[in-house]
Each structure stands twice: as structure tokens, then as C-alpha cells.
């Protein structure tokens, strides 16, 4: 047996030892459930019935003819626009602050990132208490009428509350990515800008932002994907209320499948959401590669 053959056998054995178990788990946990989920979309299964009937593409037709699903999608778009804008602006400004050489910047980084570590369910319940009791109590104490009632009881203010909390949680995560981008900006360019008389903000505008275009693209598309898949915060903070005014698309899918027991229809809605997120991810890859080539 020559050296080339023995190396090939060694590679095969290494794959069987390390790659094969991971591949088996991936197929079992991801691929098979995904294929099974696609099959469910063509049935009328309610999660309990032993008999399952084939209904063709009726579930997909019902997705686009369901006014509540369309409304949930539009609510999600509104939520995504404001949350993505707020979280990226805050995350970028935080990254600028903690890379500016301030004392204790490591502590600040950890503090700003902490909300992202805490689960959305826990954060939702914490902020639910703050909006329902802490802020209302403070509002009554100082005599401010609009603070005397909970944000979560008013349709528009409940959506604003959801945007505020989601932006607060996500900004720390985006801050870390922006820090990675800002630390790779060549110091010579910043020094040259200062020599030419540029102020701190002008250096940010003319040097730092152009140098981290790829980082900005990654953060924007990541935050868009996360907002479209937002569920835990929606569940624990507002539960889609009041009057379904904050029912986002992921929570709508949950309600359809597990509350209304329409698994076929709910899975069809989930496939539509999967396609939306997949398109967003592909756009992220495209623009990131395009920016790298330029």
C-alpha cells in the first residue's frame, strides 16, 4: 500500500470518527424534521388526529388569504424597521464609546452585552413588570398622566415598548460586531485625518464608517433576520396584545399551530417565514462579498 492510499484511508477513518456522527445528528435533527414539516403543509393534520388527509396547496393559499397573517407580517415589518434602525445606531455609538480609550471600557463592554445573554423570556417578564408596575407607580407619584397607565395596555404604545426592549437587548450584541470592525480600521488613516484638521466626528464619517461597510451590512442583515424570527420577547412581554396589536409573524405561527391546532396551516406559515429569512441571509452574503471585492 503506497503512501497516497494510506493517507486516503486515514482521512476516511477520521471523517467516520468525527464527521460522520455530526452529519448523522445534523440529518436527524435538521433535515428530517424539515422535510417532515414540508410534508405536513400539504395535509390537514391538527396534531392529534390519527387520520391525515392530503389537501394539496390549500394551506399555502390560506396563508396569503388570511388577513390576520398579513396583518402580523405588516406589524413585523414595522417592528423590524424601527428595531433594526435603533439597535444598529445604538450599537454603533456604544462601540465608538468603548473603543475610544475610556477608563473601564472592558467593564462597559460586558455590561452592555449582558442583556443579550439573558433569555428573551426572562427579559420580557422583567420589562413587563417595569412597564406595568414600576413606571406606572412612578407616573402616579409625580402626577404624569401618560405614565400612570401601562404602556402594554395601549395598542400603539405596546408596540413601541416591544421595539424599545428589543433594541435594548440587541444593541449590545451588535456592539460587539461593530467593535471588531472598528478595531480593524488602520490607525494611520485616523492619524492622517487628524493631521488634515478633521474633528472626531468627521473622522468617524470620512474614515471609520467607509472602512466598516461590510460590518455595517452584516449587522443590518443579522438584525433584520433576528427581528423577523422574534418570538420569546413577543410572548413574555405582550403575548401579542392588546387586541393582537403586537402579534408578530413568529408568534402568529405559534398561535395558529398550537392554539388553533392547525398544524398544516401553521407549518405553511413557517415555511413562508423560512423563505423570507433565507432571502435576507442570501442578500447578506451577496452584499458582504460584493463589499469585500470592492
Image (cartoon, helix red, strand yellow):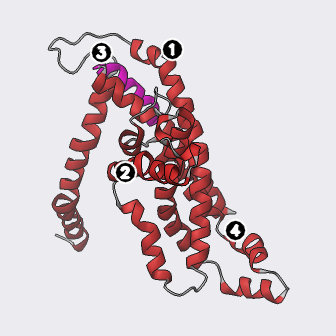
74 with respect to 256 (left or right): right
Give the residue pinned by disc 2.
Answer: 120
Pointer 2 with pointer 1, Cβ within 8 A? no
Disc on the earlier residue, 1 or 4: 1
- Is 71 part of what is drawn in magenta? no
- Residue at image position (57%, 30%) is 74
Disc on the earlier residue, 2 or 1: 1
Residue 231: mark = none
The answer to whether 235 is drawn above or below residue 71 in the figure is below
Task: Give the number of callouts.
Answer: 4
Residue 43: mark = 3
User: Which range of residues does the magenta coloring cover?
Assistant: 261-275
Secondary structure, mark 3, is: loop
- Residue at image position (35%, 27%) is 255
Residue 81's image quarter? top right
How crowded pointer 1 is (Cα within 10 Å; few <14, some 14-19, many 20+) is rated as few
Residue 209: mark = 4
Viewer can see residue 283: no
User: Can you give x and y, in whole percent of width and height, for residue 263 in the image?
Assistant: 29, 22
Specify the quadrant that holds the C terminus: bottom right
How crowded pointer 4 is (Cα within 10 Å; few <14, some 14-19, many 20+) is rated as some
Q: Rounded to the nearest whole Å, what is the CA distance between mark 3 and mark 2?
A: 33 Å
- Residue at image position (20%, 71%) is 2
Pointer 1 with pointer 3, Cβ within 8 A? no
Disc on the earlier residue, 1 or 3: 3
Disc on the earlier residue, 3 or 2: 3
Q: Rounded to the nearest whole Å, what is the CA distance between mark 1 and mark 4?
A: 43 Å
Secondary structure, mark 2, is: helix
Pointer 3 with pointer 2, Cβ within 8 A? no
Q: Nearer the viewer, residue 71 or 33?
A: 71
Amino acid at each position: 500500500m503506497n503512501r497516497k492510499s494510506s493517507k486516503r484511508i486515514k482521512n476516511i477513518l477520521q471523517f467516520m470518527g468525527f464527521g460522520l456522527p455530526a452529519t448523522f445528528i445534523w440529518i436527524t435533527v435538521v433535515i428530517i424534521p424539515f422535510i417532515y414539516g414540508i410534508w405536513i403543509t400539504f395535509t390537514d393534520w391538527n396534531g392529534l388526529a390519527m387520520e391525515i388527509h392530503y389537501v394539496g396547496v390549500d394551506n399555502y393559499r390560506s396563508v396569503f388569504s388570511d388577513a390576520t397573517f398579513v396583518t402580523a407580517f405588516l406589524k413585523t415589518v414595522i417592528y423590524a424597521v424601527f428595531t433594526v434602525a435603533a439597535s444598529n445606531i445604538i450599537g454603533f455609538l456604544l462601540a465608538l464609546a468603548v473603543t475610544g480609550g475610556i477608563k473601564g471600557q472592558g467593564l462597559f463592554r460586558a455590561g452592555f452585552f449582558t442583556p443579550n445573554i439573558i433569555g428573551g423570556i426572562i427579559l420580557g417578564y422583567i420589562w413587563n413588570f417595569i412597564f406595568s408596575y414600576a413606571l406606572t407607580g412612578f407616573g402616579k407619584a409625580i402626577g404624569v398622566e401618560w405614565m400612570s397607565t401601562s404602556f402594554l395596555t395601549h395598542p400603539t404604545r405596546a408596540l413601541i415598548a416591544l421595539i424599545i426592549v428589543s433594541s435594548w437587548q440587541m444593541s449590545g450584541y451588535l456592539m460587539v460586531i461593530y467593535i471588531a470592525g472598528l478595531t480593524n480600521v488602520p490607525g494611520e488613516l485616523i492619524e492622517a485625518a487628524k493631521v488634515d484638521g478633521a474633528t472626531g466626528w468627521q473622522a468617524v464619517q470620512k474614515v471609520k464608517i467607509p472602512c466598516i461597510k461590510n460590518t455595517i451590512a452584516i449587522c443590518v442583515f443579522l438584525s433584520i433576520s433576528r427581528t423577523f424570527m422574534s418570538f420569546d420577547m413577543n410572548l413574555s412581554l405582550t403575548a401579542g396584545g392588546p387586541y393582537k396589536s403586537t402579534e408578530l409573524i413568529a408568534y402568529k405561527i405559534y398561535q395558529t399551530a398550537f392554539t388553533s391546532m392547525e398544524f398544516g396551516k401553521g407549518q405553511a406559515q413557517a415555511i413562508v417565514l423560512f423563505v423570507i429569512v433565507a432571502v435576507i441571509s442570501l442578500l447578506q452574503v451577496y452584499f458582504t462579498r460584493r463589499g469585500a471585492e470592492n
